[in-house]
C-alpha cells in the first residue's frame, strides 16, 4: 500500500518523529514522507510513534487508494492539529486560553478545587500529637495509636470551624497573622474534644463547606466503617442519623475499641501537642490566607443551600484529588521536597525517609507544615486539571474497522446498531447512555459492543472505552477478538488480568510454534497488577502526578481496556489505601461495557449496581452485553445508572439533581439484538420497564419463529438414591457415591447412543459433559465412575475439570479441551490427537469422551458438546450449560440431549436449604422442603426465555414474609419463581413494583445505595434521610466477591530437583520457597476395565512444554506457573489436601 505521512510536530517531538519516519519512508518535504509499505509495517510505524508521543506530537497517515482518492488511516498524538479528514488547517482562530472546550460542564469544579485544597491544608494536623511524633522517631513501643492521626485531624478542624458559618471561618483564615494564629491555636486546643468526655458528634455543628472539608480530612486514608458492628450494629432505620448520631472514632479504626491496651500516658500523648499545630507555621499561614481569599470570592449563593457532602461527584472527586496528591507528595524523594514550605521554627515531622530500606529509626523526610502545604497545592492543581484529562488522553479515531460494514449477512445487524447509535452520539454526551445488547450467542456481540461505543464517541475526541468481564478466560478471549477482528494493536488495547503468569500461559497456548514510613500514602496500590499495553502514555497536564505510578499511567492511558471486573470494582468497593484512584480515573475518562453481568451471584449484585451508579456519576456511558439478562437486574441497573447520572449532570451542567435519583433525569437508552435496534429517551423507571418488556416480548417471538430447537431437556429421577443421606450428627465421612455414579453412568450410555458421530471405521464417538455444583462431590463422583466398567464394546474417557489445578496444568487441560470442542468443522473431532488415539488403539466400538466438571464448564469456554448431564443449581446454570450443547454445529436433536437430575447432592444429603452454594435458595428465601426440579415453563426446549421474561407465576404471595417469624420469605414450589424473586429481594427495596408492608426484606438490598426516597419508606422514617455514601458501611455489609480466605501453594521443583508442594515464605528476605508437602497427600485410584483418562497429564511434561516455549528452566517454569490457590485454614482447623494429577486438589 502507498502511504503518505504528514508531521505537524513541534519542539523535541519533531526530531523524534523524523528519526522514526526516515527509517521507513522517503522524505519528500520538510515534514512529509511517502513510501510503499505492508500493513504490518504500517502498524510498526504507528507503534514506534506512539511510544515516544507527547503533547507536541501530531502525525497523520494517508493511504493513497487511487489516483483520485486517499483515505486517512490514523493520527498519532494531537488530533486537533488536523480535521476529520486529516487535512492541515490553513488558518486558525485566536487561541482560547480559557479552554472552554474542556470546561463546558464542570460548573462545580471550583468547589472541588477549594474543598480538596482546604482539606489538604488540614489533613495531617493530627500528626502533630506527641504520640505520633514519638512513633516517627522510634521512641515508643506502641503499635499504632488509640486514635488515628486523621481522627485527631478531624477533631482539630472541628474545634476550629464548629458553630461558625463558612464565611466566618474562611474570613478568619484570610486574616491570619503570626499573632492571630497563636490565638486561633489556643482557642481550638481549648475547644478540642478528646473523646474522654463521652460522645460528641463531629459533624452536627459544621456549615456545608466545612462538612465536606471535615469529611475529606477523616476519609483521606479510609472510608468510615462501623468497626463495632458485631457488638453495636447500626440499624437501617437510623440511616439518616448515622453521621449525626452514630459516627464516632470506632468508625475510623478499630484501635479505639481496645483502649485498654494503651497506658494512660499514651492516651494523653495522643491529644497533646507540645510543638503546636501547623497553625504556627508562617508558610502554612500564607497558603491558608491565599486559599481562603479564593474561597471567599466564589459565588456560593448562586447554588442555593447545597449540602456539598451529599453531592457525590463533588465530594468523591475532591477525595480522589486529595488522596492522589497525598500519595504523590509523600512518595517524593528527599531532594525533591520543598524547603520553602517549611518554617524553621516548627519542628513536627510528617513522615520518614525509608528509601534506604530502614523502617525503624529512619531519618525524617518531610516536615508537617511542608507536607500539608505540598498536599494542598498538588490536590488543588490536580483538581483544576481534571476537566482536561479526557481530552488529553490517547484515543482511537478514524479507525475504519469500527465503521466499515460487516462482510457476512449474519453480522449485518451490527451495521444497523452502529448507524442508529451514531444518530444520538452528541445528545448522549449530556444525557448519558444506557444500552443493552441481547444478541444471541454467535452473532458477534463482542465486536458489536466495540462498534456501538465507537459510534457514541466524538469524532474529534476519539473513542475510549473499558470492557469489564467476570472471568479471566473471557477477558483474554475478548482481547484476542479485538486484536484479530478489529486489528487493535498493543498500542491501542490494554489487557489486564492481574497475573503475568496467566497472560504468559495464554500467549503460549495461542502461539504454540513461537519460541521465545510514617505514611500509608507511599504504598504502591497497583503493585499486583500486570497490564499488557505498549502504547502512548498520557502526556497532559496531570502527567506530573500520574508519572509516579507507571501502572496507573498505563491503566488510565489505554484507549481500550479489557479487564476482569475486579480491576474496576475498587472505584466503589475500596475502603482504604487509594485503590479506587485508578478505576475512578478510568471511569471518568472512558465509557463502560459490562459483559455478561448476569453471571454474578446474588451476593455480588449490590456491588455491581454500585459500580454502574459510579459510572453514571462519573459521566460514563454504559452498555450491558448478555443474551440472558433478567428483567429485575436490567431495571435496577438502569435505575442506579440514572441516579448516578443525575449527580453528574448537577455537577457538570447545573441541572436540578435531587439525591433520590432525580426522577425527571432523561437518559438515552438503547436496545440491540440481531433482529432490531431501538433508541428511546427515558425519564422514569416505569417508562424504562415498559420499553424493555416490549423489546423482550418482540425478541422472544422472533426467536421462537426463527430458531430450531437445539437443546431438549428431561429430568432424571433420583428418588432411589438414599446412600448420600447424612445423619444429623454426621460430618459426612466417606459418603457412598456409588448409586449416583451408577445412575449417571447409565445416562452417559443412553445419551451417547442418541447423540454421537460415526467415524469412517464404523466406531462411534461422542463428547459429553457432566456438570456438578461443587469440587469435592465432583471428584468423589469421578473416582467412583472410573471404577465402574462400561457396557461391553464401550470405552469411557474422562477428563476432570475444575479450578483447583496448578495454573500450568489447568491451562494445558483447557487448551486440549478447546481443541477437541471446537467443532465448527463436523469431522474435525476425529483429527484431535486424544480422540484419534482412542479410535486407533481402543478395541471398543463406542467411545464416550466425558468432561466431569464444576460450573467452570458453563461459561468462559467456546465449547460444543453432544450432550450434557447436570446436577441442578439454578435455572440459570442449566440455561448456561445448554449453551455449550450443539453450540457450533447447530443440529436439532430428535430426543433429549440434556438430562437434569431432579435433586442435587445437597438435597440427596437431606440438607436444607439445598439449592445454594451455588444457587438462588437461602434460609431467608427458601424453596419448599423436598422440592424436586421440573423442566416446565419453557425448559423442556431449553432456551433463555424463562430467564429474560418473568414467568406468570411470579405473584404477590411470592414476596410476602412467612408468619410468624417475618425473618424469611414464604417458601415457593417453582424454580423460575425462586430465581426471579431472589433477584428482586437482592436488588429492590420493594420486593415488588411498589412498597408493601407485608413484603419480606433482606435489609441488604442493592437499592439502598442510590434510592433515598424508598430508603426512608422502607425504614419507616418520617422524612427522607441523608444518604450513607459518605461511609463504607453499606459496602461492608454487601462486599464484592466475599469468600473464604485463600492461601497460595506451588507445585515446583526444589533444590534437589524433586517436584514438591511449596509455599513462598515472605517473612524473610530474599523470599524463599518452603516445603509444604505435609499439607498434601497423594490420592490413589484404580481404573476399571474400559475406563481411561482422556489424556496423559504429567506435571513434569507440562512444565517442560512451557519451559521450552518461554526459554526458561523447568524449575523457573514450575515456580512461576505452578501456583494453586486453596481455601485457607480457619482458626482451629487443619486441612490436608488430596492431590492427583488427573483429579486436582480436593478434600475427601
Image (spheres, rainbow, N blue to C red):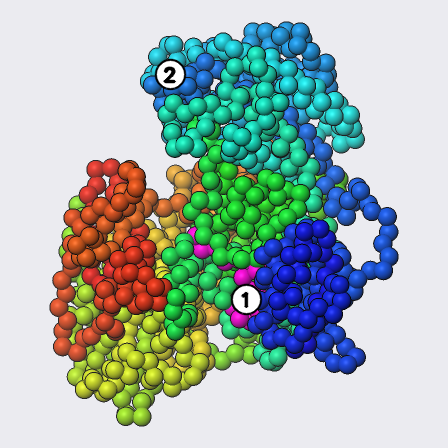
Q: Which mark is residue 482?
A: 1
Specify the segment rendered in magenta: 481-498
Q: Which mark is residue 554?
A: none
Left or right: residue 596 versus residue 454 is left
Residue at 68% x, 19% y is 286
Quadrant of the drawing holding the N terminus? bottom right
* Label 2 or label 1, whichever comes before in sequence order: 2
Closer-to-camera residue (834/390): 390
x, y percent for residue 778: 26, 61
Quadrant of the drawing holding the C terminus? bottom left
What is the CA distance from the residue labelled 2 to the residue labelled 1? 57 Å
Density class for disc 1 (Cα within 10 Å; few <14, some 14-19, many ≥20) is some
Q: Quadrant of residue 788?
A: bottom left
Density class for disc 2 (Cα within 10 Å; few <14, some 14-19, many ≥20) is few
Query: Which is in the foreground here, disc 2 or disc 1?
Result: 2
The reply to whether residue 309 is visible in this rendering is yes
Residue at 16% x, 76% y is 789
x, y percent for residue 1018: 54, 37
Q: Check if residue 924 falls in the magenta segment.
A: no
x, y percent for residue 318: 62, 34
Residue annotated with mark 2: 139
Secondary-structure class at tag 1: helix
Left or right: residue 549 versus residue 383 is left
Residue at 57% x, 49% y is 556
Residue at 63% x, 61% y is 19
Amino acid at each position: 500500500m502507498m502511504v503518505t505521512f504528514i508531521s505537524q510536530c513541534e519542539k523535541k517531538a519533531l526530531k523524534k518523529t523524523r528519526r522514526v519516519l526516515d527509517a521507513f519512508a522517503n522524505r519528500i518535504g520538510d515534514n512529509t514522507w511517502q513510501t510503499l509499505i505492508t500493513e504490518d509495517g504500517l502498524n510498526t510505524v504507528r507503534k514506534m510513534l506512539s511510544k515516544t508521543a507527547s503533547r507536541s506530537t501530531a502525525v497523520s497517515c494517508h493511504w493513497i487508494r487511487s489516483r483520485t482518492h486517499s483515505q486517512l488511516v490514523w493520527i498519532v498524538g494531537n488530533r486537533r492539529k488536523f480535521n476529520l479528514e486529516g487535512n492541515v488547517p490553513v488558518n486558525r482562530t485566536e487561541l482560547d486560553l480559557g479552554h472552554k472546550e474542556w470546561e463546558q460542564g464542570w460548573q462545580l469544579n471550583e468547589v472541588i478545587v477549594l474543598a480538596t485544597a482546604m482539606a489538604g491544608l488540614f489533613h495531617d494536623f493530627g500528626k502533630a500529637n506527641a504520640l505520633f511524633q514519638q512513633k516517627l522517631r522510634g521512641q515508643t513501643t506502641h503499635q499504632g495509636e488509640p486514635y488515628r492521626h486523621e481522627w485527631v485531624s478531624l477533631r482539630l478542624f472541628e474545634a476550629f470551624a464548629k458553630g461558625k458559618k463558612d464565611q466566618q471561618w474562611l474570613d478568619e483564615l484570610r486574616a491570619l497573622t503570626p499573632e492571630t494564629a497563636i490565638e486561633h491555636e489556643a482557642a481550638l486546643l481549648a475547644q478540642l474534644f478528646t473523646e474522654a468526655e463521652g460522645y460528641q458528634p463531629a459533624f452536627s455543628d459544621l456549615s456545608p463547606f466545612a462538612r465536606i472539608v471535615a469529611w475529606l480530612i477523616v476519609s483521606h486514608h479510609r472510608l468510615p466503617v462501623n468497626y463495632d458492628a458485631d457488638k453495636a450494629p447500626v440499624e437501617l432505620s437510623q440511616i439518616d442519623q448515622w453521621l449525626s448520631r452514630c459516627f464516632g472514632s470506632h468508625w475510623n479504626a478499630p484501635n479505639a475499641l481496645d483502649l485498654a491496651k494503651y497506658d494512660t500516658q499514651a492516651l494523653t500523648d495522643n491529644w497533646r501537642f507540645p510543638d503546636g499545630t501547623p497553625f504556627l507555621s508562617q508558610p502554612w499561614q500564607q497558603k491558608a490566607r491565599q486559599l481562603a481569599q479564593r474561597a471567599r470570592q466564589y459565588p456560593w449563593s448562586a447554588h442555593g443551600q447545597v449540602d456539598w457532602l451529599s453531592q457525590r461527584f463533588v465530594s468523591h472527586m475532591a477525595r480522589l484529588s486529595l488522596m492522589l496528591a497525598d500519595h504523590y507528595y509523600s512518595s517524593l524523594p528527599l531532594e525533591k521536597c520543598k524547603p520553602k514550605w517549611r518554617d524553621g521554627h516548627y519542628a513536627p515531622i510528617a513522615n520518614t525517609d525509608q528509601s534506604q530500606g530502614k523502617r525503624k529509626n529512619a531519618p525524617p523526610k518531610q516536615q508537617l507544615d511542608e507536607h500539608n502545604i505540598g498536599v494542598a497545592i498538588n490536590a488543588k492543581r490536580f483538581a483544576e486539571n481534571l476537566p482536561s484529562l479526557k481530552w488529553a488522553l490517547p484515543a482511537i479515531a478514524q479507525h475504519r474497522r469500527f465503521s466499515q460494514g460487516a462482510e457476512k449477512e449474519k453480522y449485518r445487524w451490527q451495521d444497523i446498531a452502529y448507524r442508529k447509535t451514531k444518530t444520538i452520539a452528541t445528545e448522549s454526551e449530556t444525557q448519558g447512555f444506557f444500552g443493552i445488547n441481547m444478541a444471541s450467542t454467535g452473532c458477534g456481540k463482542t465486536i458489536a459492543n466495540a462498534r456501538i461505543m465507537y459510534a457514541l464517541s466524538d469524532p474529534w475526541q476519539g473513542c475510549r472505552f473499558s470492557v469489564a468481564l467476570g472471568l479471566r478466560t473471557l477477558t483474554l478471549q475478548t482481547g484476542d477478538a479485538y486484536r484479530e477482528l478489529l486489528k487493535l494493536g498493543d498500542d491501542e488495547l490494554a489487557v489486564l488480568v492481574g497475573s503475568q503468569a496467566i497472560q504468559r500461559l495464554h500467549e503460549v497456548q495461542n502461539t504454540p510454534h513461537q519460541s521465545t514510613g510514617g505514611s500509608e500514602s507511599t504504598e504502591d496500590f497497583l503493585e499486583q497488577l500486570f497490564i499488557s499495553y505498549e502504547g502512548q502514555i498520557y502526556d497532559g497536564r496531570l502527567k506530573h502526578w500520574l508519572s509516579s505510578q507507571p501502572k496507573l499511567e498505563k491503566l488510565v492511558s489505554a484507549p481500550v481496556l479489557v479487564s476482569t471486573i475486579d480491576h474496576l470494582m475498587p472505584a466503589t468497593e475500596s475502603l482504604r489505601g487509594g485503590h479506587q484512584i485508578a478505576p475512578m480515573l478510568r471511569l471518568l475518562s472512558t465509557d463502560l461495557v459490562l459483559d455478561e453481568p448476569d453471571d454474578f451471584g446474588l451476593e455480588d449484585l449490590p456491588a455491581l449496581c454500585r459500580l454502574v451508579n459510579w459510572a453514571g456519576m462519573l459521566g460514563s456511558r454504559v452498555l450491558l452485553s448478555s443474551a440472558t439478562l433478567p428483567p429485575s437486574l436490567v431495571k435496577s441497573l438502569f435505575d442506579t445508572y440514572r441516579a448516578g447520572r443525575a449527580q453528574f449532570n448537577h455537577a457538570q451542567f447545573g441541572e436540578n439533581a435531587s439525591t433520590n435519583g432525580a426522577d425527571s433525569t432523561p437518559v438515552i437508552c438503547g436496545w440491540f439484538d440481531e433482529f432490531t435496534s431501538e433508541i428511546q429517551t427515558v425519564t422514569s423507571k416505569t417508562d424504562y420497564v415498559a420499553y424493555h418488556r416490549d423489546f423482550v416480548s418482540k425478541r422472544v417471538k422472533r426467536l421462537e419463529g426463527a430458531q430450531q430447537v437445539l437443546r431438549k431437556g428431561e429430568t432424571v429421577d433420583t428418588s432411589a438414591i438414599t446412600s448420600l443421606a447424612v445423619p444429623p450428627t454426621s460430618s459426612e465421612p466417606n459418603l457412598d457415591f456409588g448409586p449416583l455414579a451408577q445412575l449417571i453412568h447409565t445416562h452417559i450410555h443412553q445419551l451417547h447412543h442418541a447423540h454421537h458421530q460415526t467415524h469412517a471405521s464404523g466406531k462411534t464417538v461422542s463428547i459429553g459433559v457432566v456438570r456438578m455444583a461443587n469440587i469435592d462431590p465432583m471428584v468423589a463422583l469421578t473416582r467412583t465412575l472410573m471404577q465402574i466398567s462400561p457396557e461391553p464394546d464401550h470405552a469411557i474417557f474422562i477428563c476432570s475439570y475444575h479450578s483447583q489445578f496448578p495454573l500450568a496444568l489447568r491451562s494445558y487441560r483447557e487448551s486440549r479441551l478447546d481443541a477437541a470442542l471446537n467443532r465448527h468443522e463436523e469431522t474435525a473431532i476425529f483429527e484431535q490427537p486424544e480422540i484419534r488415539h482412542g479410535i486407533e488403539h481402543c478395541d471398543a466400538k463406542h467411545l464416550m469422551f466425558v468432561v466431569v466438571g464444576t460450573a467452570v464448564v458453563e461459561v468462559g469456554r467456546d465449547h460444543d458438546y453432544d450432550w450434557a448431564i447436570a446436577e441442578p443449581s439454578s435455572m440459570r446454570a442449566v440455561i448456561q450449560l445448554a449453551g455449550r450443547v450443539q453450540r457450533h454445529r447447530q443440529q436439532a436433536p430428535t430426543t433429549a440431549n440434556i438430562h437434569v437430575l431432579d435433586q442435587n447432592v445437597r438435597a440427596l444429603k437431606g440438607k436444607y436449604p439445598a439449592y445454594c452454594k451455588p444457587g438462588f435458595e437461602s434460609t431467608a428465601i427458601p424453596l419448599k422442603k423436598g422440592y424436586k426440579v421440573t423442566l416446565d415453563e419453557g425448559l423442556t426446549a431449553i432456551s433463555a426465555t424463562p430467564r429474560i421474561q418473568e414467568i406468570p407465576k411470579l405473584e404477590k404471595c411470592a414476596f410476602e414474609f412467612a408468619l410468624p417469624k417475618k425473618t424469611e420469605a414464604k417458601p415457593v414450589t417453582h424454580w423460575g419463581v425462586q430465581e426471579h424473586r431472589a433477584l428482586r429481594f437482592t436488588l429492590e427495596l420493594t420486593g415488588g413494583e411498589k412498597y408493601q408492608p407485608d413484603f419480606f426484606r433482606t435489609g441488604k438490598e442493592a437499592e439502598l445505595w442510590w434510592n433515598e426516597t424508598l430508603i426512608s419508606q422502607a425504614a419507616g422514617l418520617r422524612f427522607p434521610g441523608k444518604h450513607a455514601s459518605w461511609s463504607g458501611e453499606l459496602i461492608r455489609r454487601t462486599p464484592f466477591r466475599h469468600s473464604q480466605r485463600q492461601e497460595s501453594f506451588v507445585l515446583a521443583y526444589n533444590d534437589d530437583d524433586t517436584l514438591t508442594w511449596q509455599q513462598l515464605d515472605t517473612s524473610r528476605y530474599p523470599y524463599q520457597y518452603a516445603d509444604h508437602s505435609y499439607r498434601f497427600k497423594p490420592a490413589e485410584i484404580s481404573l476399571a476395565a474400559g475406563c481411561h483418562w482422556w489424556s496423559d497429564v504429567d506435571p513434569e511434561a507440562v512444565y517442560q512444554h512451557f519451559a521450552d516455549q518461554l526459554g526458561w528452566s523447568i524449575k523457573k517454569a514450575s515456580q512461576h506457573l505452578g501456583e494453586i490457590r486453596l481455601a485457607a485454614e480457619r482458626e482451629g482447623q487443619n486441612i490436608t489436601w488430596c492431590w492427583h494429577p488427573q483429579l486436582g486438589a480436593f478434600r475427601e
